[in-house]
Amino acid sequence: MRLLRTVDANPEHPKEECGVFGVYAPGHEAARLTFFGLFDLQHRGQESAGISVSDGARVRMHKEMGLVTQVFNEEILKTLPGHLAIGHTRYSTTGSSVRRNAQPVSCTTMDGDIAVAHNGNLINAAEIRHELEDEGEVFDTTNDSEVIAKLLARETDKPMEDAVAAVMRRVKGAYSVAVLTPRQVVGFRDPYGVRPLVVGKFKGGYCISSETCAFNPVGARIVKELGPGEIAVLDENGVRFVQGVPKERPSMCMFEFIYFSRPDSEMYDTFLYAARHRMGEELAREQPAEADMVVPVPDTGFPAALGYSRVSGIPFGEGLIKSRYIHRTFIEPDQRMREMGVRMKLHALADRIVGKRLVIVDDSIVRATTTKQIVRLLFDTGAAEVHVRITAPPIRYPCFYGIDMARRGELAAAKWSVEDIREHIGASSLGYLSVDSVVKAVGQDKDRFCLACFNGEYPIDVPSDLRKDMFERPKVGAFATVRSGQGKFEFPEDEAGSRE
Ligand code: SF4
């Protein structure tokens, strides 16, 4: 089966990481429930999908490159019998985009096979992998989940909670993990709680998911969001929660609220749609503009654009239409079409924007390439002014916790001032939301979040080899300090990037 990569509707956005889902439901087809759960987590990863299922004795698995609906059909689901399952949608942040790196990954133990699905990034995966290889382990993949699976397989003489806790003491980084054994589904979350994981209950069983939006198709309601360092075990006794390792300062990824998670999900007792609407309201207060119409960049800009419109009094209007099926094509555009860039994915509504002064609301600027194309598209279509407003603060630092943003030298806001970026994208004006206002819009304490890509304060210490990989080579004598939750470290100031 030859599959090509999907076309990203807006490559300006940071890339989603992964979605995990698990279910324990006696009397139900767990694979079918997991299929529908994954369908609602598709936005977190479009490269591959997989489901592992158990009938109480034997673990079976199917995974493949492609979208959930391309990987599974009725015939395949019939080969996956059982009442407990885990599933995964993948966007690769570690390990290359090939079938063998699709998840879940499985591992054979004395007590039967186990399967592991993971969202996040282990910052000491390479170190552990080398140690295990020295001890004779052979790895089939290059992803972090296999590291977790191998560690777990060595602990299966213990009760599951103890085995998982032993693994949690060994690995470092951001991880929300689902594990399937022949008789249990287990979820666990790193001690900082960077990536989300929530437990739900429905008539007939329990489930775990990266986001609550995946509860809808199974009719589940929230039991609780797993806390930092917490484990949930789903089995014949129901669900039980155990503190696997002591919790550190909670550091939920702020980008889950700004962009990654679906607007109909709920996290930290906050509805994402409402939080994004409030971000738009704050943006209108902090970054006002004289304009005739507020236009969202589809789809994620909608709630914030509505919030901006409400506070500013400027009418809301659709001026850009996204090609609805862009995520569904596996046919690569040819070179000429690629050069058209954003015009393949977004279309301007000429009759609504000609001669108008527009406020364009989007969630983030990474490299500024796509934003520049959107601004040009609107001016070419006849807009009089294009004021760009962004609900994320400027992204100045790379992410080491499972989000594929860019190296520091590629980040527009790490290289240029806001005025330089405005000039580069050709906008009439440019305004970002401040870190304090993003936090205010979410409605939680600032010290409950990871904000590292905005302020460089990394809650989990990052090893120097990873830092070197993501930061530019130093200019002689030019260093800046990045604050870390576990002490300070220095990184080299990168050189000013050349204009695209
Ligand atoms: S660095 Fe940014 S994207 Fe990465 S976990 Fe922290 S807030 Fe999220």
Image: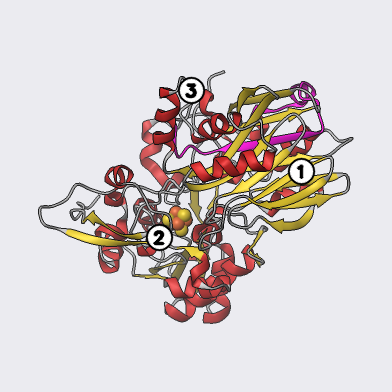
| Residue type, mark 2 in image | Ala
Q: Position of residue 256 (x, y in %)?
A: 54, 57
Q: Nearer the viewer, residue 352 or 102?
A: 102
| Residue type, mark 1 in image | Leu
Residue for badge 2: 452
Left or right of 81? Residue 492 is: left
Residue for badge 1: 234
Between discs 2 and 1, the one toward the N terminus: 1
**Mark carried by residue 463:** none
Which residue: 63% across, 64% down?
268
Q: Answer with the quarter of the image where residue 364 lies.
A: bottom left
* Pair 2/1: label in front: 1
Between discs 1 and 3, the one toward the N terminus: 3
At label 2, counting other C-alpha atoms closer than 10 Å, the crowd grade (few under 14, some 14-19, many 20 or more) is many
| Residue type, mark 3 in image | Phe
Distance from mark 2 CB to nearest ligand 1 atom below 8 Å: yes
Distance from mark 3 CB to nearest ligand 1 atom below 8 Å: no
Residue for badge 3: 139
Task: Label 2, secondary structure: give it.
Answer: helix
Distance from mark 1 CB to nearest ligand 1 atom below 8 Å: no
Disc 2 to disc 3, C-alpha distance: 32 Å
Between discs 2 and 3, the one toward the N terminus: 3
Give the magenta part as a residue range: 71-95
Q: Is residue 75 magenta?
A: yes
Left or right of 429? Residue 303 is: right
Task: Label 1, secondary structure: give it.
Answer: strand
Q: Position of residue 453 (x, y in %)?
A: 39, 58
